[in-house]
C-alpha cells in the first residue's frame, strides 16, 4: 500500500459554494468505522464511488469487502492502529465486491473518533484518485496554455475588468501579469478602439457568440508605431454552465497587415498588367495599339497620358528605329527626330483646352504650346523628353503650382533595345505622386505596347514574304491524275491576319495511282509557311517511296518533331540580351489519301485533320468515318488506315478548317453548310468549287482556305490487262505473248518489242529471286504501265555488272528503255513496274547503240 507523508490539519472554513465548485468535481465520499472495525455509516457518495449500497456496506469489515486479498493483512493492521488513535492518509486500491482484481485507486484520510461511551472509532474521507489526477492535468494544461502562450491572453470578469493576464501580454504592455488585474480596455487603447472592444466584449458575454479576427489598431506604451492586432473573444463558463467571464486572445498581425497591403498593391498592378496583356496589341495598327495602351492606363494608373511615335515608323520607313544611346544626327535614337502625337487620354474633367480643341501643354515642356493628336513635332534637345529618348531611361517630372499635373513619368517605349516612341503618364493634383513601384509598372506597360508596335511594323514585311513563299509552294496550274477529274482552290487570309500554313498537293504514284494530300500547319507567319514547305517536300519524297498512307504520316510525324530547330548562332548573338532562344515546336494536321483507278478504292489516313467529304451519285454528302489520329509533331500514337470503295461519278472533297469554321459560326454549322453546297455534284467540277466558295462565308479572312476536289472516273475495264502466271520457266514466254496481244488490241504495236523485252526481264527476275505466284498487269491511260507482282520481300537493286558477268544487266536495261521504273511493297510481297510514254503518231524511239553499250 502506497503512503503519503502525514500532514497537520488546519482550520476549516465553512462557505456556501456556487454550483460547479471544486467539490462537485472531486465528489468527496465518507464512511465511519465502529470500535469493532465494522462499517457503521455509509454516505451516498460512497455508494456512487464504490457501487455498494448502504445496506450492503453497514456491518461489514471494509478490509475484507473492499481490499484485494494480498493486501488484507496489511489493511487489518492499519485499521487496528487507527482504532488505537492514530491518523492515516494514503492511497488504497479497492475492488467492487464479487470481483478479484482492483477496480480503482482511492485517496483516503482516516481520523480517529470516540463514541458516546468513550470507545475508539474512525471517520474515513475518500476521494477517487482518477478525479484528482484529471483536475491536476487540467490545471497544468490550463496553466501551460495561458502562461506559455506566445500570444497575448486576457481573462475578463463579468464586469469587463481584467481578471488575469498572461506573461506575453505583460511583455507588450509593461509590468507583471498581476499588475493588469482590475484594468479595462480603456487603459490600453484609444477611445474609438476601446469602445469597439467594449461593445464586442459585452456582446460575447450576453449572447455567447464568439468574435474572431476583430482588428484593433493601437500603440504599445512608449512606442510610436501603430500596431495591428487580431482579437478573438469567446465566453467562459463554469462547470455548471454559468458564464463567468470572457477570454480574449490577441495576435500581433502588423507584419501580416503590411504584407497584405503590399500584396493588394501587387494584385492591383498584376490585374492592370493582365488587362494590358488582354487589351494591348489586339490589332496590327500602330495608332490603335497606342490608344489601347491609354485605355488601360487611364484612369486605373494615372489621370492623363499621351503617346508619341517616331514619324518614320508611321510612314513605313524600312530603316529600323535607332537604338537608344546611339548618336545619329537625325536618327530616332538622337532624341530630336520627328515624332507624331498618336493618342491622348484624360480622366480629369477640367483638363485645360485650347479654343481649337487642343489639350494643355505637356508638363515639363519649356514652351506652352499644346500638342494636338496627329501633330508632328520635335522635343528640344535638352528637354527631359529628348533625354529619355536618348538614354532609354525613365524620367520623372514634378509639376509646378500652376500645372495641372502633380507628377509625370516620361517613359521611352523600347522593344528589343530599340526605342520606337515615348509615353507620358501624369497624375493630377490631389492624387498620390508616382513611386518606385509605379515606375516599374509604367516601364512594363510601355514595353508591352512597344513590342506590339514593333511587331506590327515587322509584320508588314513578314506577311508579304510569307505570302510569296506560300504561293510558290502550291501546285501550279490544274493538277492531272489518272481516273480523276481534279479542281482546287486556295484563298489566303486577309491582310489583317498572318499567313497560315495550309497546303494541298496531287502526287502521281506508280500504277496510275494518285496521292491526294491536304494539310494545315498550326500557327501563322513566315515560320508556318516555311514549315508548310518542308512538310510538303517531305510528303512528295515519301510518296515516291510508295509507302502506305499510315506509314507516310508516321514518317511525317517524326519529321514535324524535328522541324523546330534552335535559333542559329549568329541570330543568338544578335539577341543575346533577350536570353536563350528555345526550339520552336511545329504541329500540323494532314489527310493523306491514295486512289487506285483500277479498283476504284481509296485508302485514307488522317493526322488530326477534318474528315473528307464524299458525295455518291444520288446520295447526300457525308463525312467519311476516318479515325482522326493525333496531329503531326505530337508523336507516340500510330495512325490508322481506312479503305473505301468509291463508285464512278462520286465526288471527293478535302478541305482545311478555314472553309468551315470562323468566329461567326461553330464548326458543326460550317460542315453542314459545306455538305449542302455539294448537293449537285454532277455539275462541272470548277463550278462546284465556285459554288462552295460563294455559298460559305469565305470572305471573313480569319484563316487561309484550301479546297481540293476530285471526281471519280476510274480506268475502264478495257484499259487494264491482268493475268496470273504459274511459277515455272515457260511463264516468261507466256508473259510475252500476253503483252504482245494486249498491245495489239490497244493499237500500240510500236511498243511491242520494248515491252516484250522488259516484261521478260521482270518475269525472269520474279522467277529467280521472288516467291509464290506471279501476276502481270498492263495499264493504259496517259502512259503505259507494266507491273509484275510476286510474294517475295527482297526489293530489286540496280547494279553495274562487270565485263565478265553473264547477267546483272536486266534492271539496267529496264532503266534505259523505260521512262521510269521502280519497286514497291505490297501486303503480300512486292511489285516491280516500269512506265512508257505512248507513241504520238510515230514509231517509238529505239535505244541507240551507245546506250546499249553503256551497260557493259
Image (cartoon, grey):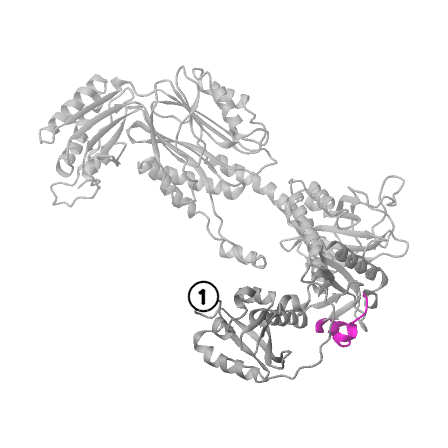
Q: Residue at 53% across / 33% down in the picture?
A: 704
- The x, y position of residue 114, in whole percent, is 63, 80
| The one of 18 and 121 positioned closer to us in this rendering | 121
Q: Which residue is mark 1?
A: 98
Quadrant hosting residue 545? top left
Quadrant hosting residue 853? top left
- The x, y position of residue 490, in whole percent, is 50, 29
Q: Is residue 838 left or right of residue 287?
A: left
Q: Is residue 143 left or right of residue 77?
A: right
| The one of 432 and 543 positioned closer to us in this rendering | 432
Q: How would you rate the neighbour count of disc 1 (Cα within 10 Å): few for under 14, some for 14-19, many for 20 or more?
A: few
- Is the residue 53 above or below the residue 777 in the image? below
| The one of 550 and 850 positioned closer to us in this rendering | 550
| The one of 714 and 512 positioned closer to us in this rendering | 714
- The x, y position of residue 778, in whole percent, is 23, 25
Count of numbered marks: 1
Q: Is residue 518 left or right of residue 721?
A: right
Residue 687 magenta-highlighted: no
- The x, y position of residue 124, in whole percent, is 59, 75
Query: Dot 1 lies on which element?
Result: loop
- Is the residue 658 above or below the residue 165 in the image? above
Q: Is residue 353 left or right of residue 162?
A: right
Residue furthest toward the front?
117
Residue 170 magenta-highlighted: yes
Residues shaded magenta = 166-184
Q: Is residue 382 visible?
A: no
Q: Residue at 54% across / 81% down in the picture?
A: 3
- Is the residue 531 above or below the residue 518 in the image? below
Q: Quadrant of the C terminus?
A: top left
Amino acid at each position: 500500500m502506497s503512503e503519503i507523508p502525514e500532514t497537520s490539519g488546519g482550520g476549516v472554513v465553512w462557505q456556501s459554494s456556487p454550483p460547479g465548485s471544486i467539490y462537485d468535481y472531486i465528489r468527496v465520499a465518507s464512511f465511519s468505522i465502529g470500535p469493532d472495525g465494522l462499517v457503521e455509516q455509509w454516505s451516498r457518495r460512497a455508494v456512487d464511488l464504490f457501487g455498494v449500497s448502504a445496506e450492503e456496506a453497514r456491518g461489514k469489515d471494509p478490509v475484507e469487502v473492499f481490499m484485494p486479498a494480498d493486501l488484507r493483512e496489511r489493511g487489518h493492521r492499519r485499521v487496528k492502529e487507527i482504532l488505537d488513535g492514530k491518523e492515516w492518509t494514503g492511497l488504497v486500491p479497492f475492488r467492487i465486491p464479487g470481483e478479484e482484481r482492483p477496480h480503482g485507486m482511492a485517496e483516503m484520510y482516516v481520523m480517529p473518533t470516540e463514541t458516546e461511551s468513550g470507545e475508539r472509532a474512525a471517520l474515513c474521507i475518500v476521494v477517487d484518485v482518477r478525479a484528482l489526477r484529471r483536475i491536476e492535468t487540467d490545471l497544468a494544461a490550463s496553466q501551460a496554455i495561458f502562461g506559455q502562450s506566445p500570444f497575448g491572453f486576457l481573462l475578463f470578469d463579468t464586469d469587463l475588468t481584467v481578471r488575469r493576464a498572461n506573461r506575453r501580454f505583460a511583455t507588450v504592455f509593461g509590468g507583471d501579469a498581476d499588475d493588469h488585474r482590475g484594468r479595462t480596455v480603456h487603459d490600453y487603447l484609444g477611445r474609438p478602439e476601446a469602445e469597439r472592444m467594449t461593445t464586442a466584449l459585452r456582446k460575447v458575454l450576453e449572447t455567447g457568440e464568439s468574435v474572431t479576427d476583430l482588428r484593433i489598431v493601437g500603440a504599445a506604451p512608449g512606442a510610436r508605431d501603430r500596431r495591428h492586432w487580431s482579437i478573438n473573444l469567446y465566453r467562459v463558463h463554469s462547470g455548471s454552465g454559468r458564464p463567468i467571464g470572457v477570454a480574449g486572445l490577441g495576435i500581433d498581425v502588423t507584419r501580416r497587415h503590411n504584407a497584405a497591403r503590399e500584396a493588394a498593391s501587387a494584385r492591383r498592378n498584376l490585374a492592370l498588367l493582365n488587362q494590358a496583356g488582354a487589351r494591348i496589341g489586339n490589332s496590327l495598327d500602330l495608332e490603335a495599339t497606342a490608344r489601347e495602351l491609354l485605355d488601360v492606363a487611364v484612369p486605373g494608373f494615372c489621370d492623363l497620358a499621351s503617346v508619341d511615335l517616331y514619324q518614320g515608323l508611321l510612314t513605313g520607313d524600312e530603316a529600323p528605329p535607332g537604338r537608344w544611346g546611339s548618336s545619329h544626327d537625325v536618327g530616332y535614337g538622337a532624341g530630336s527626330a520627328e515624332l507624331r502625337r498618336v493618342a491622348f487620354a484624360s480622366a480629369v474633367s477640367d483638363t485645360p483646352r485650347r479654343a481649337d480643341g487642343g489639350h494643355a501643354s505637356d508638363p515639363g515642356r519649356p514652351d506652352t504650346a499644346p500638342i494636338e493628336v496627329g501633330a508632328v513635332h520635335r522635343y528640344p534637345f535638352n528637354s527631359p523628353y529628348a533625354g529619355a529618348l536618348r538614354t532609354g531611361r525613365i524620367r520623372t517630372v514634378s509639376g509646378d503650382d500652376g500645372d495641372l499635373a502633380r507628377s509625370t513619368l516620361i517613359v521611352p517605349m523600347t522593344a528589343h533595345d530599340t526605342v520606337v516612341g515615348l509615353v507620358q503618364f501624369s497624375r493630377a493634383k490631389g492624387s498620390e505622386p508616382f513611386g518606385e513601384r509605379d515606375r516599374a509598372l509604367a516601364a512594363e506597360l510601355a514595353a508591352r505596347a512597344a513590342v506590339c508596335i514593333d511587331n506590327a511594323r515587322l509584320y508588314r514585311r513578314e506577311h508579304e514574304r510569307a505570302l510569296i513563299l506560300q504561293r510558290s509552294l502550291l501546285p501550279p496550274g490544274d493538277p492531272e491524275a489518272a481516273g480523276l477529274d481534279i479542281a482546287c482552290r486556295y484563298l489566303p487570309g486577309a491582310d489583317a491576319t498572318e499567313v497560315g500554313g495550309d497546303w494541298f498537293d496531287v502526287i502521281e504514284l506508280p500504277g496510275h495511282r494518285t496521292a491526294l494530300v491536304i494539310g494545315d500547319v498550326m500557327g501563322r507567319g513566315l515560320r508556318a509557311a516555311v514549315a508548310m514547305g518542308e512538310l510538303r517536300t517531305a510528303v512528295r519524297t515519301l510518296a515516291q517511296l510508295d509507302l502506305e498512307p499510315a506509314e507516310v504520316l508516321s514518317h511525317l510525324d517524326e519529321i514535324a518533331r524535328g522541324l523546330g530547330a534552335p535559333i542559329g548562332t549568329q541570330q543568338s548573338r544578335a539577341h543575346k540580351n533577350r536570353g536563350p532562344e528555345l526550339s520552336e515546336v511545329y504541329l500540323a494536321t494532314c489527310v493523306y489519301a491514295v486512289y487506285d483507278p483500277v479498283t476504284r478504292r481509296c485508302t485514307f489516313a488522317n493526322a488530326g485533320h477534318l474528315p473528307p467529304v464524299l458525295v455518291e451519285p444520288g446520295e447526300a454528302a457525308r463525312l467519311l468515318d476516318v479515325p482522326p489520329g493525333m496531329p503531326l509533331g505530337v508523336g507516340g500514337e500510330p495512325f490508322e488506315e481506312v479503305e473505301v470503295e468509291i463508285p464512278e461519278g462520286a465526288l471527293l472533297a478535302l478541305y482545311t478548317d478555314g472553309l468551315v469554321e470562323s468566329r461567326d459560326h461553330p464548326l458543326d454549322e460550317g460542315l453542314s453548310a459545306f455538305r449542302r453546297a455539294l448537293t449537285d455534284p454532277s455539275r462541272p467540277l470548277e463550278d462546284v468549287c465556285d459554288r462552295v466558295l460563294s455559298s460559305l462565308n469565305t470572305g471573313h479572312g480569319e484563316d487561309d482556305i484550301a479546297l481540293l476536289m476530285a471526281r471519280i472516273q476510274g480506268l475502264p475495264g478495257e484499259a487494264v490487262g491482268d493475268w496470273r502466271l504459274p511459277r515455272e520457266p515457260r511463264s516468261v514466254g507466256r508473259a510475252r505473248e500476253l503483252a504482245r496481244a494486249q498491245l495489239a488490241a490497244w493499237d500500240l504495236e510500236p511498243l511491242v518489242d520494248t515491252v516484250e523485252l522488259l516484261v521478260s526481264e521482270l518475269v525472269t527476275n520474279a522467277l529467280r529471286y521472288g516467291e509464290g505466284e506471279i501476276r502481270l498487269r498492263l495499264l493504259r491511260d496517259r502512259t503505259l504501265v507494266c507491273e509484275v507482282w510476286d510474294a517475295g520481300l527482297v526489293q530489286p537493286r540496280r547494279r553495274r555488272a562487270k565485263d565478265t558477268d553473264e547477267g546483272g544487266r536486266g534492271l539496267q536495261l529496264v532503266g534505259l528503255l523505260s521512262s521510269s521504273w521502280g519497286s514497291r511493297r505490297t501486303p503480300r510481297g512486292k511489285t516491280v513496274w516500269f512506265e512508257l510514254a505512248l507513241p504520238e503518231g510515230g514509231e517509238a524511239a529505239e535505244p541507240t547503240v551507245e546506250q546499249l553499250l553503256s551497260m557493259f
